[in-house]
Image (cartoon, coloured by chain):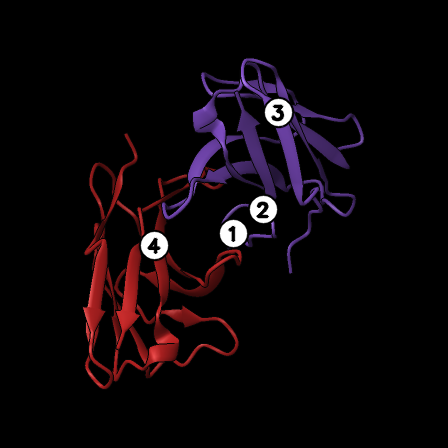
Chain colours: A red, B purple
Amino acid sequence: GAVVSQHPSWVICKSGTSVKIECRSLDFQATTMFWYRQFPKQSLMLMATSNEGSKATYEQGVEKDKFLINHASLTLSTLTVTSAHPEDSSFYICSARVQGDNSPLHFGNGTRLTVT
Amino acid sequence: DAKTTQPTSMDCAEGRAANLPCNHSTISGNEYVYWYRQIHSQGPQYIIHGLKNNETNEMASLIITEDRKSSTLILPHATLRDTAVYYCIVREGFQKLVFGTGTRLLVSP
């Protein structure tokens, strides 16, 4: 159980275009999902916390107008990278938590974004 | 900032136990210790977590010292597929999960 599915697994787009990444909790409901970004040979960095039915909370230094997050249902959160540039090329990973204060987060398999 | 310190890398022979240490000297009473691992180009995989008692599941054992300032993740019989970066994280309740740099474990034949 506790499967998080992320789509697409990889995407290549041209500079200036927008890309949407989906994160689904397949067998549980997630009121909160988290979006991370990982550059090569670095650790995961939290970008934002996505709350169902309300606005996302962004970490310091993350542009909310560039990284649009929508969490419209208890099983789906989306991250849209708007007007992508080559420096946005990275590995984007979502996670979700099964209900319960100290239950662990479960992660999707990530989306590798390459902006040309 | 991450609240844990881990060795940068460790080596282990296949079939032997891998013992990965983690220091979390500033852990608070309500914070749990979580372990995740990340195999290259995949999302992190949950391994185990605990508060103060030792825990064991099908993947690993977690040993937490009595003062809770450090812990050890034990993979009892490491295989080549256990080669990954292992992250030790402390978190309370609904706090966000903050990743440190982790330990790169290399399991060799």
The kind of secondary structure element at disc 2 is: strand
Q: Count neighbours of disc 4 (C-alpha within 10 A) and say few if under 14, some if 14 to 19, many if 20 or more.
A: many
Give the chain of mark 4: A
Say whether mark 4 and mark 3 are on the same chain. no
Task: Identify the disc placed on residue A94.
Answer: 4
> In the image, which is nearer the foreground, mark 3 or mark 4?
3
Q: CA distance from mark 4 to mark 2?
A: 18 Å
Q: Which mark is residue B12?
A: 3
Name the image quarter holding the N terminus of chain B: bottom right
Determine which quarter of the picture holds residue B103: top right
Residue neighbourhood size for the residue with mark 3, other residues' Cα within 10 Å, grouped as few (<14), some (14–19), many (≥20)? many
Which residue matches tag 1? B97
Q: Which residue is mark 2?
A: B91
Q: Amino acid at mark 1?
A: Leu
Given the image, on which type of amino acid does mark 2 rest? Arg
| Lower position in the chain sequence, tag 2 or tag 3 | 3
